[in-house]
Amino acid sequence: MVARCAVAQTPWTRLRGLLGRELAADAGLWIRPAASIHMFFMGYPIDAVFLDRDDRVVRIVADLAPWRTASCRGARTVVELPAGTAARVGLREGETLRHEPAH
């Protein structure tokens, strides 16, 4: 699905998120822990993929616009992707995402 995904796991990196950064077509940001996100001060939409503790997709918010929020009860992490990515790759709720550490 996504070739590379930066991880935001400190309070500062989770708060900053994607502010001031663009996402490449094959990139994402994995925010952990997080059950909600905000799009304040963002200049472009994203897809937000909420995952449970087993990395199973529990909600997909496609094309989340700037100045909006999204949350999901039961989510433990969120993967932010370029808008349209979830649909383009056929990502569905109930699927389990696999991740591997970068080498």
Image (spheres, rainbow, N blue to C red):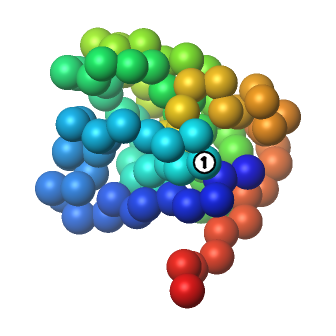
The picture places residue 44, in percent across and down from the top left corner, at 38, 19
- Inspect this view and state whether residue 78 appears: no
Q: Quadrant of the C terminus?
A: bottom right
Residue 41 located left or right of residue 35: left
Q: What residue sits 15% from the left and 56% below the top?
A: 12
Can you tell which quarter of the image residue 43 is in?
Answer: top left
- Vertical order, 16 against 38 (above or below): below
Q: Nearer the viewer, residue 24 or 97?
A: 24
The picture places residue 63, in percent across and down from the top left corner, at 55, 17
Residue 99 located left or right of residue 95: left
- Inspect this view and state whether residue 5 appears: yes
The picture places residue 62, in percent across and down from the top left corner, at 61, 21
Q: What residue sits 50% from the left and 43% below the top?
A: 24
Q: What residue sits 20% from the left and 45% below the top?
A: 15
Number of labels in the image equals: 1
- Vertical order, 24 against 83 (above or below): below
Q: For the view shown, which residue lies furthest in the bottom direction?
A: 103
The picture places residue 36, in percent across and down from the top left corner, at 39, 36
At mark 1, the secondary structure is: loop
Other residues around mark 1 within 10 Å, as few (<14) / some (14–19) / many (≥20) = few
- Vertical order, 99 against 37 (above or below): below
Q: For the view shown, which residue lies furthest in the left direction?
A: 12
Q: What residue sits 23% from the left and 56% below the top?
A: 13
Q: Nearer the viewer, residue 42 or 96?
A: 42
Callout 1, which amino acid?
Asp
Residue 26 located left or right of residue 38: right
The residue that label 1 is drawn on is 26
Q: Nearer the viewer, residue 3 or 54?
A: 3
